[in-house]
Amino acid sequence: MAKELAKTYDPREVEDRIYKYWLEGGYFHAEIDYDKKPYTIVIPPPNITGQLHMGHALDNTLQDILIRWRRMQGYCALWLPGTDHASIATEAKIVEALAREGLTKEEIGHEAFMERAWAWKEKYGGKIIEQLKKLGSSCDWERERFTLDEGCSRAVREVFVRLYEKGLIYRGERIINWCPHCLTSISDAEVEYEEKDGNFWHIRYPLTDGSGYLELATTRPETMLGDTAVAVHPEDERYKALVGKTVTLPLVGREIPVISDEYVDPEFGTGVVKITPAHDPNDFEVGLRHNLPVINVMDDKAVINKDGGKYTGLDRYSAREQIVKDLKEGGYLVKVQPIKHNVGACYRCDTVTEPRISMQWFVKMKPLAEPAIKAVKEGDIKFVPKRFEKIYFNWMENIKDWCISRQLWWGHQIPAWHCGDCGEVTVAKDTPAKCQKCGSENITQDPDTLDTWFSSALWPFSTLGWPDETEDLKYFYPTSTLVTAYDIIFFWVARMIFSGLEHMSKKPFDTVFIHGLIRDAQGRKMSKSLGNGIDPIEVIEKSGADALRFALATGNSPGNDMRFSIDRIEASRNFANKIWNAARFILMNIGENKVEFGLPEELCLEDKWILSRFNRLVPEVTENLEKFELGIALQKVYDFIWDLFCDWYIEMTKSRLQEKGQEAENAIRVLVYVMSNTLKLLHPFMPFITEEIWQALPHQGESIMVSPWPVYDESLDFAKEEKEMERIMEAIRAIRNRRAEMNVPPSKKAKLYIETDYKDTFKAGEAFFVRLASASSVEVGDSFDIGEAVSIVTGDARIYIPMEELIDKAAEIARLQKELDKAKMHLEQVTAQLNNEGFLKKAPENVVASQRELAAQLAEKISMLEDSIKALS
């Protein structure tokens, strides 16, 4: 006896209940099984500050498709979940909360701040995990990790100490990217560049001996307060004689040298550049080569400091305005040249970053980058699509040392202790009791924390127990597939690769599957400012997770952005309803009967056709999934279900089902077999509805998600019958099309005469022509002479339908004449308007053009109607 399905599919009633069933069954949990091959995905850990957005929904839908598919294929499939502590974003939330109480983090102190941060994490940090569950994510929640948990923190300290001892982590003064809003250094990867309008201010720097001046240009006049030289190219004949002289810095009065350095491009501008070692990375390098002083003229908030003279206390933009005004008044400003240039901003808060000299901790990148480049070049790690390797190589081959220290409190505090007596720095995994050099107990831990990406770079192995050599680590590492958007290739992917190779001596994953970004229907990036974002949780609550997943996977191709609109959800709901109704039809026909599981021995032509088509579908879908062509795989399953199974096969079985008996039972068994197995192909994409229907149908096993993935079966290859059925279907399509062209309703039955060399095939299909092509009866033969008839030709047959059986001639001529008279009257009105000079002069050009186009369309319609009347007469 079949389980009953509700009349309409209600995802709100189904999805939470099904998810609870999966959790209670432990189906998401992966236990080491040496009889199975492991397949591992580590989730890109979402920030604890995060709310599920469409990007998360896409990323996790794609991961869930892959993990569900591999689980059904018999792999020991582990999808390891977790969250990221997100130092900058989380600290900003805590600081905002404190500000609402009139407090600062400095006022409450480090310990109280950390207590608040952990309390915030406990309250809000799990929200995105619950949202991922609503999406249907089949993560192994028993293994959920957090980048600041004890195990991950231990791995971070281990890595820091190892790299420090190898000389790959060092502390020093360098130019770094500084965010004046977040008040911390950020790495090169965290600076986002955007083209903006700006200016080149051309300034005269007078030679101190009064013999003239040097002209140069800058986009940041406020930094001139920290200039310690001007530079020219050593081979530039214009300036050779001036090298060694000095200029007097305008507005400041400081004497600074004219130096020569190959960094200067003699072809650009005047061939003279100002050198500000504290505020420009290239100038810093020049300063090192020429032993120039380093004068930092800004504080942490990009306000001019005490070294800025009269401009002290002004923010950088106010200082710029005042300096330009003073340069003009002093006769130093030559001209202002408008330009477009790339301006770097903090990826978190969009504040323009400031290059500034700072004492920070760095990772030496060249030795780590080389093996990571080699691993991808030699194909050990594959990018899908391959074109994204270029972005990876470009980043890795031009990589600079990574600034890993952040002036924040929330995060992994750097495991380094400074001695207050001798200045020695002790780096250790565990808190030392005294200075390793002088033995003093007057030591304090470095206040800085590590870049968030430092801990997430270790994610593929730290989450599996490293630095301990656990059984999980030995079995599940290297992981299999890393799924991510292209915008974090250098933030995260590159860092995981070099970290895995360095600390595990193995790659972290086999394949990097890159997907694009979600854009709105117009191709714009979804953002708060545009107000074009779509909340995935709202979509799930209204239409269900399956509808959202289907919409996200449909048309998805590796690496390409996708346009998303609510219209896609409507198409998803329609598909879900189509499957639901097909299942209800099957269950209704099973009724109280007990259906034997599996295929019957006796198969009809249509049974063999649908089984053969399904059998061909299985390896195609599997191959598409192997190639990460998830959108193509889903489209093939969709087409099979909607067109071949629902619109054709189910319709073909109806006459057999009405007869009851053995024929009906055989049809039901084939319907159940094809439906159940097609649901398996669809399950990774739409897990909830497929589970609900599968459970209702006769089945073997506890859950569709652990049932075996379909495989090609040679015994179900019915190529001959498939071809025969295609001949019948082609004829039915052609008849339907011709009847539609003639506006003949399906209720109007007519006899078919079929001339063909495939008489047996078409005779076997007589019932289908009656049911699906509105035939009153069918006659198959070599040739027919039936007088006036509609003729339809296909590749294998000529079909005749007697005209008098299709239409009432007199009534049809009357109808066409009425339509002709109406069209002629309309044309007369439009022609009169176009012959009116007043209309032509006063009406807008587009209106006149539109009326001319209408007149042409009406004339064509009249001609066609006259031809139709003539043909009938």
Image (cartoon, rainbow, N blue to C red):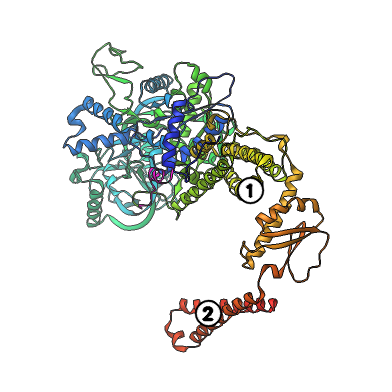
Left or right, 294 with reference to 650: left
Mark 1: which amino acid?
Lys
State yes or no: residue 3 in magenta: no
Mark 2: which amino acid?
Arg
- Asked which quadrant contains residue 304, the reply is top left
Q: Which residue is mark 1?
A: 654
Nearer to me, 827 or 667:
667
- Label 1: state its secondary structure: helix
Mark 1 vs 2, N-terminal side: 1
* Quadrant in which the N terminus is drawn: top right
Above or below, 413 relative to 183: above
* Quadrant in which the C terminus is drawn: bottom right
Left or right, 232 with reference to 516: left
Nearer to me, 259 or 492:
492
Q: Residue at x 44, y 47 (%)?
A: 265
Above or below, 161 relative to 118: above
> For the magenta stretch, what is the residue range?
530-544
Q: Which residue is mark 2?
A: 852
